[in-house]
Amino acid sequence: MEVFADKLINITRHNAEAIAEQWAKSVSSNPRTPSYHSIPIDTCKQQAVDFYKNLRAIYFSEKPYDESVKFFTKFAEDRYSEGIPLSEAVYILILIRRHLWLFADFRTPFLAGLDIKQKVGAINTTIRIFDHGIFIIIKKYDELEKYSMAPEQG
């Protein structure tokens, strides 16, 4: 699996700017992400660049869930502090994944000659990372909401 995974993660990391550019254009006009319509495109783009460049650390970690918790907790805290609703925070993550696969899909030469088991394994690992991310984001938003609604102790 590592041969395919290395290629997938490397193509993502080396093309993070280009993938993020497409993602930023998508979220800045998507009807499901209205909070992003007023955010400068460069700010949007940087969020995705950071994600794509950091995906490697999660993907190849010996404890990927622990790395996911760190990364997606910060992701959730940042989006929450920016006033991004939970539904949009989850949807932008879905779009990040979609743009990663769209970009990789158009780079078919990097897929040629690889074993189907490698491809499926890498795809499953990527999906698992994003699934964990969605869960962690929802959990963190719940914690932040409870904290913000708690009566102040004084």
Image (cartoon, rainbow, N blue to C red):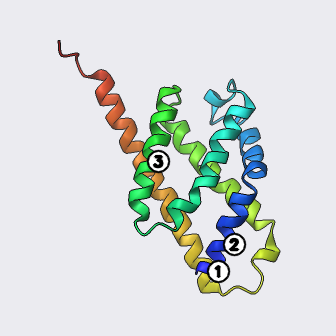
Q: Quadrant of residue 9?
A: bottom right
User: Between marks 3 and 1, how big is the CA–CA gap?
Assistant: 26 Å
Which quadrant of the figure contains the N terminus? bottom right
- In the rendered image, residue 62, in percent from the top left (x then y), is placed at 42, 69
Q: Secondary structure at mark 2?
A: helix
- Residue highlighted by disc 1: 3
Q: Earlier in the sequence, mark 3 or mark 1?
A: 1
Q: Which mark is residue 7?
A: 2
The residue under label 1 is which amino acid type?
Val
Q: Which mark is residue 72?
A: 3
Q: Secondary structure at mark 1?
A: helix
User: Between marks 3 and 2, how big is the CA–CA gap?
Assistant: 23 Å
Label 2 crowd (10 A; few <14 / some 14-19 / many >=20): some
- Identify whether 122 is placed above or below 82: below
User: Between marks 1 and 2, how big is the CA–CA gap?
Assistant: 6 Å
Choose between 125 and 66: the one closer to the eye: 66
Q: Earlier in the sequence, mark 3 or mark 2?
A: 2
Which quadrant of the figure contains the C terminus? top left
| Count of marks placed on residues | 3
